Image: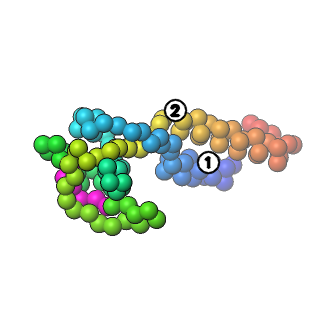
C-alpha cells in the first residue's frame, strides 16, 4: 500500500514539472501590458531570432533593450546585449501555459495508469 502511495506522489510531483504550453504570437502592446511572462522570442525583419528572459528586457520609446541570446539556424545560443527597434521586429512569440490541456493530460495519464494496473492485476481487490 505504501509503495503505491509513494509512487503516486512521485508521479504527480514529476508531472508538476511538466505542462502544456502553446506558442502564441502577440503584439508589442501585449508585451508591455502582460505581467505574467517568462520569456519572449523575437524574429526581426532581417530574419534574426532572439530570446529574452524576464526581467532581462524592457521596452522604452519604441525600442526593446535587453540582455538575451540570438538563436542561430542550428538553435545555438549567442549572447546578446543591446537594443532592437520595434519597427525591426517582425514577430513576437510567447509560450502560454494552458491549464485545461495540462489537467486533461494528467487525467488521461492517471486513467491510463489505473487501467494498466487493473489489467495487470485483475484478481486484486480494488479497495
Answer yes or no: do the residues labelled 2 and 1 have beta carbons within 8 Å?
no
What residue lies at 32% left-to-right and 54% top-to-bottom? 46
Q: Say whether residue 26 is left or right of residue 125.
A: left
**103 is within the stretch colored magenta:** no
Where, by quadrant of the figure, is residue 93 drawn? top left
Residue at numbered disc 2: 100
Q: Position of residue 30 (x, y in %)?
A: 28, 35
Query: Residue placed farthest to the right in the image?
Result: 123
Mark whose residue sits in front, 2 or 1: 2
What residue lies at 40% left-to-right and 63% top-to-bottom? 72
The one of 21 and 74 positioned closer to us in this rendering: 74
Q: Say whether residue 74 is left or right of residue 1.
A: left
**Which quarter of the rendered picture does the C terminus lie within?**
top right
Query: Residue placed farthest to the top in the image?
Result: 100
Residue at numbered disc 1: 8
Which span of residues is magenta-colored?
A: 64-69
Q: Position of residue 29 (x, y in %)?
A: 25, 34
| Chief secondary structure of the magenta portion | strand
Query: Residue placed farthest to the left in the image?
Result: 61
Q: Position of residue 61 (x, y in %)?
A: 12, 43
Q: Position of residue 43 (x, y in %)?
A: 35, 50
Label 2's element?
A: helix
**Alpha carbon separation for disc pair 2 and 1:** 21 Å
What residue lies at 32% left-to-right and 45% top-to-bottom? 90
The one of 31 and 88 positioned closer to us in this rendering: 88
What residue lies at 85% left-to-right and 42% top-to-bottom? 122
**Position above or below: 99 against 55:** above
Residue 58: tell me if it is visible. Answer: no
Q: Earlier in the sequence, mark 2 or mark 1?
A: 1
Amino acid at each position: 500500500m505504501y509503495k503505491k502511495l509513494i509512487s503516486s506522489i512521485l508521479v504527480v510531483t514529476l508531472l508538476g514539472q511538466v505542462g502544456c504550453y502553446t506558442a502564441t504570437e502577440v503584439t508589442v502592446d501585449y508585451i508591455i501590458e502582460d505581467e505574467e511572462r517568462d520569456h519572449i522570442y523575437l524574429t526581426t525583419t532581417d530574419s534574426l531570432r532572439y530570446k529574452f528572459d524576464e526581467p532581462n528586457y524592457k521596452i522604452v520609446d519604441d525600442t526593446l533593450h535587453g540582455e538575451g541570446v540570438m538563436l542561430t539556424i542550428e538553435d545555438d545560443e549567442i549572447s546578446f546585449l543591446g537594443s532592437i527597434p520595434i519597427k525591426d521586429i517582425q514577430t513576437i512569440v510567447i509560450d502560454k501555459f494552458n491549464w485545461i490541456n495540462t489537467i486533461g493530460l494528467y487525467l488521461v495519464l492517471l486513467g491510463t495508469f489505473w487501467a494498466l494496473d487493473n489489467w495487470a492485476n485483475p484478481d486484486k481487490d480494488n479497495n
